Image: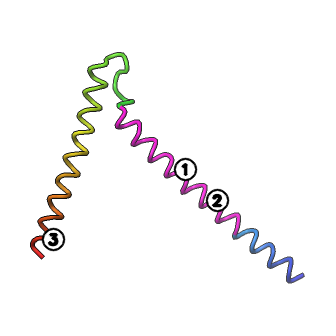
Amino acid sequence: MAADAGHGDRSAESQRILERVARDSSLFGRTTGFARDHFAAADADQNDWIEVWGTRIGRTLGILIVCVLIFWAVSLFVAGA
């Protein structure tokens, strides 16, 4: 009888772990899908190629500028330490 209760506890715990993994995986999938669509300009008018490419270039330059600013800030912090 006690062995059955232990098996039920382990089974319930395993089910909770699997549900958590599925939830975390889907969150990662949604986040990467959002980032992919954002940088691919999925929200721009697909019939206007200038708008699509302008959006893609602008968003790419934006992320590059942010990366440069972060690198610059870290180098200033390290040099000042």
**At which x and y percent is residue 18?**
66, 61
* Occupied quadrant, residue 54: top left
Give above or below for 40 relative to 8. above
Residue 26, labelled with which disc?
A: 1
**At which x and y percent is residue 25?**
55, 54
- The residue at which mark 2 appears reads as 19
- Please name which of the two marks, 1 or 3, marks the residue nearer to the observer: 3
Q: Dominant secondary structure of the magenta stretch?
A: helix
- Please, what is the three-letter code of the amino acid marked with disc 3? Val
- Please, what is the three-letter code of the amino acid marked with disc 1? Ser
Instruction: Report the span colored magenta.
Output: 14-40
- Name the residue: 20% across, 57% down: 70
- Name the quarter where the N terminus is drawn: bottom right
73 and 34: which is toward the camera: 73
- Name the residue: 23% across, 34% down: 58
Quick one: SS at disc 1?
Answer: helix
Mark 3 crowd level (few <14, some 14–19, many ≥20, 10 Å Cα) = few
- Name the quarter where the C terminus is drawn: bottom left
Quick one: SS at disc 2?
Answer: helix
> Disc 1 vs disc 3: Cβ atoms closer than 8 Å?
no
- Please, what is the three-letter code of the amino acid marked with disc 2? Glu
Is 54 situated left or right of 69 in this image? Answer: right
Is 15 situated left or right of 4 in this image? Answer: left
Question: Magenta includes 27?
Answer: yes
- The residue at which mark 3 appears reads as 78
Quick one: SS at disc 3?
Answer: helix
- Name the residue: 42% across, 41% down: 34
